[in-house]
Amino acid sequence: MASSFTRVISGRNTAVMLAMGAGTLTSGYLLSDNMEAAERRRLYPPSADFPDLRKHNNCMASALTPGIYARLSDKTTPNNWTLDQCIQTGVDNPGHPFIKTVGMVAGDEETYEVFAELFDPVIKDRHNGYDPRTMKHPTDLDASKITSGFFDERYVLSSRVRTGRSIRGLSLPPACTRSERREVERVVVTALAGLKGDLSGRYYSLGDMTEREQQQLIDEHFLFDKPVSPLLTAAGMARDWPDARGIWHNNEKNFLIWINEEDHTRVISMEKGGNMKRVFERFCRGLKQVEHLIQERGWEFMWNERLGYILTCPSNLGTGLRAGVHIRLPLLSKDARFKKILDNLRLQKRGTGGVDTAATGDTFDISNLDRLGKSEVELVQLVIDGVNYLIECEKRLERGQDIKIPSPVPQN
Amino acid sequence: CAKNTQPTGTPPFEEEFPDLSKHNNHMAKVLTKEIYGKLRDKQTPSGYTLDDVIQTGVDNPGHPFIMTVGCVAGDEESYEVFKDLLDPVISDRHGGYKPTDKHKTDLNHENLKGGDDLDPNYVLSSRVRTGRSIKGFTLPPHNSRGERRIIERLSIEALNSLDGEFKGKYYPLNTMTDAEQEQLIADHFLFDKPVSPLLTCAGMARDWPDGRGIWHNENKTFLVWVNEEDHLRVISMQKGGNMREVFRRFCVGLQKIEEIFKKHNRGFMWNEHLGYILTCPSNLGTGLRGGVHVKLSKLSTHPKFEEILTRLRLQKRGTGGVDTASVGGVFDISNADRLGSSEVEQVQLVVDGVKLMVEMEKKLEKGESIDSMIPAQK
């Protein structure tokens, strides 16, 4: 994709420069075909391109200043990804007065470095003050450290852990070419074919699946659709759909991988019931095996010690991990203190359809708020301890006893 | 697969070639691996690539019955740099138009014969629209915010200098009041942020509503859209069947606007092969759609209706415009051609064709046959 600063304004061969006058037609001019970069900048200084963000409410709009824009607008990553491309989704989607979206995406691993002047404050804003310049992110996928990971199944209906992984050396979904996307599919599907035992399974390419397979995957709640959210489409993630997109799952249907949706891969471990420890154990085991299988062929995941695992959306940096349950809390959910309890436990509630859906009845999706600055083990333990606390509250309310708002979980 | 931690050299073009097996649009019919291989490394001076040109056609496989174009231009040079793809697309879309053909421009409204006597009992409204691109800027799929804003500014200055029957006012999309917005909707003037994936996948909705707006004259008979699918869309319209007057106002207004731009050394994109250069190849040539809303309840159910339209070189749409259904037997009838015939010729076809169809409708109302009136292919 073209970057704006490489454009040369072509015109008639007679290079007629008329005086620049603000607000008059004489601010028009014709240029010769060979325009110097300095001339180009004079005609379209960064201020000419600075987006109108007055009605916007997203992390990008809060952080982007004309100064930052001016300093970054001439830069590109080695894949020619530009600042304008990072922020397009945030310009096109002003946001919601109550929900603060991120408003920018990465096109490749280098994005987070080249445009750090904008990404760092956004990361800080989104991840509770985490400073990538000074802090390190811990990665810990040792599931044996988890304690009390078995929930009361009268309340917890299902348990799930998801994350994302990107293949180093290939551009991310907003930026990738068709050949890169196909390469991601090839690399990952080849690796997954090497999984054995309870992890062995098969791949369903979105473009080739039969109607029957499609219906099966829908019934199992595995199938992902072409993105319709303008947050994603404005970032270019739906290009060439459904080319090189697909779903892999194991035969036992409790380990699932999405290929080339919002990230190169989304890895999901799930099962009915409350055995979160087993879900996490399988999650870690599967992830490590997949990593090993791609490394055998000379590939690796995008990761660094400042930002952890590199994903398309800055909100998913670090662990990229969302561990959650579908849980019935009929009494607690009606208690005025519910939100505060969740906040202090660093948990969030969603509807049972996932993000931006409403709860059905008294059943909620409860998961960790944080992604960056705490390890996978810490976050899953936090969810386990938090959900156990919520269940205790529900039981106390059942018995007519009072409940307490817990003290806030320590931050970074 | 080999180790790959740095961006590789360019992959072979076969790796990049889109999967068009389920596609039904002009681009998909024309694009071969050979053409792709030849063009994929090229760029226009502003950096527009083949992948940019075809993205909308890749993302929108099309409809089994309706053939969309499936490609757009990012700038004037696109039609040159990617001619190996666009010439065959243009030929397919515009009735075999050859790369060596010349297009005639005729905006002299006095050359139109008749057109002032279409029966207003049948012809409810008349309208002519076209598009114009300002030379020296890239087109809506590709332009930057800075360019789009300059296009807006230049357009406002030109339009604000119009007077007489053309005196009017500009309403920027991002600052119009609620009252202004409601009025423009009630007048059927307001255009919305594109939702059609044909347009959004081509990048035309970026930065909405920055730099977009609507200008219209006080009489509400002459209207200009700024920075929607093209730099400018110019529309002349009024109730009733006086297409002659609509076309007069259209030609006069367009030429006044063009004069003002030319005075400041700006022109519209035009060449003698493709006529007026617009974003979508379907709008090349005149970019003109001249049409009426006309009541044809009986004729529209006649078995030869489609054939009559084809022979008259006309097309029908619903009263909501493209991709809508007719309501109450009222159809939008307009010229099918854009490239290879002039503005006067195209509007003449509409005027003559609609006149004939209204006479057919009257005959059918009286229970008479119209077989002797079926025209030869124009």
Image (cartoon, coloured by chain):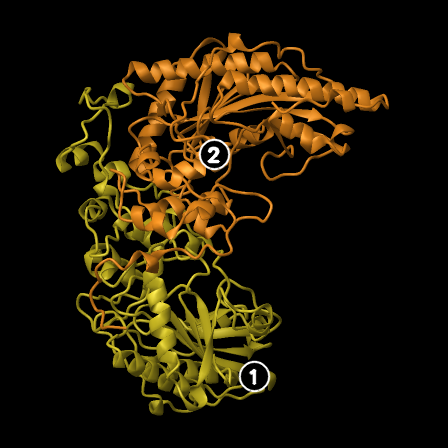
Chain colours: A yellow, B orange
| In front of the other: B90 or B51 | B90
Residue at (60, 26) in percent of width and height: B313
Say what amino acid the circle numbered 1 marks.
Tyr
Residue A213 % position (x, y): 57, 72
The residue pinned by badge 2 equals B282
Q: Circle 2 sits in a helix, a strand or a loop, which is it?
A: helix
Quarter of the image containing the N terminus of chain B?
bottom left
Residue B343 position, x and y percent, is: 50, 19
Q: For this rendering, which residue is in front, B56 or B378?
A: B378
Determine which residue is flagged by label 1: A155
Helix, strand or loop at label 1? It is: loop
Please say if B313 is above or below B12.
above
User: Is B240 situated above or below A222?
Assistant: above
Position of residue B155 in the picture relative to residue A33 (left or right): right
Q: Residues within 10 Å of mark 2 (few under 14, many from 20)?
A: some
Q: Quadrant of residue A272?
A: bottom right
Give left or right: position of A320 versus A243: left
Q: Position of residue B350 (x, y in %)?
A: 60, 21
Callout 2, which amino acid?
Answer: Ser
> Is label 1 in contact with label 2 (beta carbons under 8 Å)?
no
